């Protein structure tokens, strides 16, 4: 599978201040029967976005400005809970390309990276500032591994393993990476 390359994401932030947002909150279990990524965005955070009868709430996720945000800033321990690849599928289908938090669950982080969603763990002081200032314009640069805040707030580094970084920059998942090596694999097999 190829994914949209991710080099630079500049966007207003959408902020969810709650800590311990688990994968069932991101993508409720009733939507796990879907086997494709397309269309899952309408179900992401459905318990925040819809009433019991299916009516849209006035949550920021339903607003025009919210739907234009490509960067989600979330409370501590984002993506905890079960391994649910539908969670990053839904977030990317909604339009997010970057998740910023002070901590992100390891399994969610791995699933996100495999599906074109960049999980950024940031310094707690920067994270708290972002939580207190929803809707600010932020740039996340994967080439330099920097989160650039509005003027006067500086740039802040984040870490990502080199393989995941390469795949995101090139728009590849793990299988795409292997397929891109097919000539070298054939040459090796011929030897």
Image: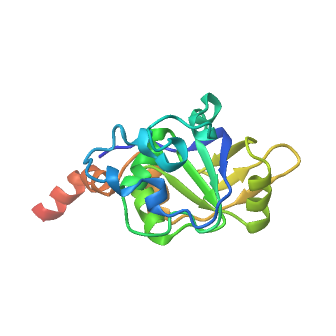
Is 11 on the left-hand or right-hand side of 1?
Answer: right
Q: Position of residue 191 (x, y in %)?
A: 13, 65
Q: Residue furthest top?
A: 64
Is 37 on the left-hand or right-hand side of 131?
Answer: left
- Name the image quarter holding residue 100: bottom right
106 or 179: nearer the eye?
106
| Whether residue 132 is situated above or below residue 6 in the rendered picture | below
* Residue 61 in view, yes or no: yes
* Residue 4 in view, yes or no: no
Residue sitting at x 51%, y 44%: 6
Q: Position of residue 38 (x, y in %)?
A: 33, 38
106 or 177: nearer the eye?
106
| Whether residue 34 is situated above or below residue 11 in the rendered picture | below
86 or 181: nearer the eye?
86
Is 146 on the left-hand or right-hand side of 164?
Answer: right
Residue sitting at x 29%, y 50%: 176
Q: Position of residue 144 (x, y in %)?
A: 64, 53
């Amino acid at each position: 599978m190829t994914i949209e390359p991710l080099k630079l994401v500049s966007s207003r932030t959408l902020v969810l201040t709650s800590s311990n947002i688990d994968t069932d909150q991101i993508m409720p279990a009733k939507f796990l029967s879907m086997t494709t990524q397309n269309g899952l965005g309408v179900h992401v955070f459905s318990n925040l976005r819809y009433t019991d009868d299916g009516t849209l709430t006035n949550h920021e996720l339903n607003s025009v400005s919210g739907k234009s945000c490509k960067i989600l800033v979330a409370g501590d321990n984002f993506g905890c809970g079960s391994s649910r690849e539908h969670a990053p599928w839904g977030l990317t289908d909604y339009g997010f390309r970057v998740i910023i938090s002070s901590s992100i669950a390891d399994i969610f982080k791995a699933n996100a990276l495999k599906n074109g969603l960049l999980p950024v763990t940031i310094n707690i002081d920067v994270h708290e500032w972002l939580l207190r200032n929803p809707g600010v314009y932020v740039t996340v640069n994967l080439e330099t591994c920097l989160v650039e805040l509005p003027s006067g707030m500086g740039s802040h580094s984040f870490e990502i393993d080199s393989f995941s970084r390469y795949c995101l920059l090139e728009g590849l998942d793990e299988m795409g990476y292997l397929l891109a090596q097919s000539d070298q694999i054939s040459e090796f097999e011929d030897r």
